[in-house]
Amino acid sequence: MMKDKRDNKHMGETLEMIIRRRGWNISELAKNIGADRRSFYYWFKQQEIKESVLLRISEVVDYDLSRDFPSFSTSSADFKKFTELVQPAPKTYWKDKYVDLLEQYSELLSNTVAGQNSSKAG
């Protein structure tokens, strides 16, 4: 966990204030970062918050949390790598995957039926 040693801010309260000022609905935000609402209310009560949590929230709300927590840096190369990892798959990923598998199945089924027909003919 990281603590802002400079001014001993209550990280949870500060985070809640930032999120609410930016107009985010807690349920919507929780869904976007892959957490549940209860997690947010838990974090809001915490004096210290894990850097990984701050990274996810910072990316989704598009806000540089290092303004409020100087010991937290969102400008590092690690942050960029992290945000690339947590990006959700494109919306068409699963549809495309399904279509590919369906085409493979159809081809396999056609080959199997064709093989059975040639066995019966011979």
Image (tube, rainbow, N blue to C red):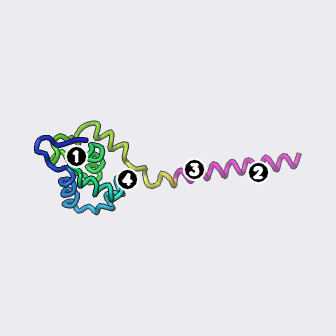
Please tell me the numbered disc located at residue 25.
none
* Magenta-tinted stretch: 96-122
Position of the N terminus by quadrant: top left
Labelled pair 3, 1 in contact (Cβ < 8 Å): no
Q: Is residue 116 magenta?
A: yes
Q: Earlier in the sequence, mark 4 or mark 2?
A: 4
Q: Which residue is mark 3?
A: 100
Front tag of 3 and 4 = 4
Instruction: Say what secondary structure mark 2 lies in.
Output: helix
Which of discs 4 and 2 lies nearer the camera? The answer is 4
| Mark-to-mark CA distance, 4 and 1 | 20 Å
Sequence-wise, which precedes: disc 3 or disc 1?
A: 1
Disc 4 designates what residue? 34
Q: Secondary structure at mark 1?
A: loop
Q: Residue 76, percent across and down?
A: 24, 37
Q: Where is residue 5? Give x, y as percent.
A: 14, 40
State the residue position of label 1. Answer: 48
Mark 4 residue type: Gly
- Alpha carbon of mark 3 to alpha carbon of mark 1: how far? 46 Å
Q: Residue drawn 26% across and 43% down?
A: 51
Picture quadrant where residue 79 is located: top left
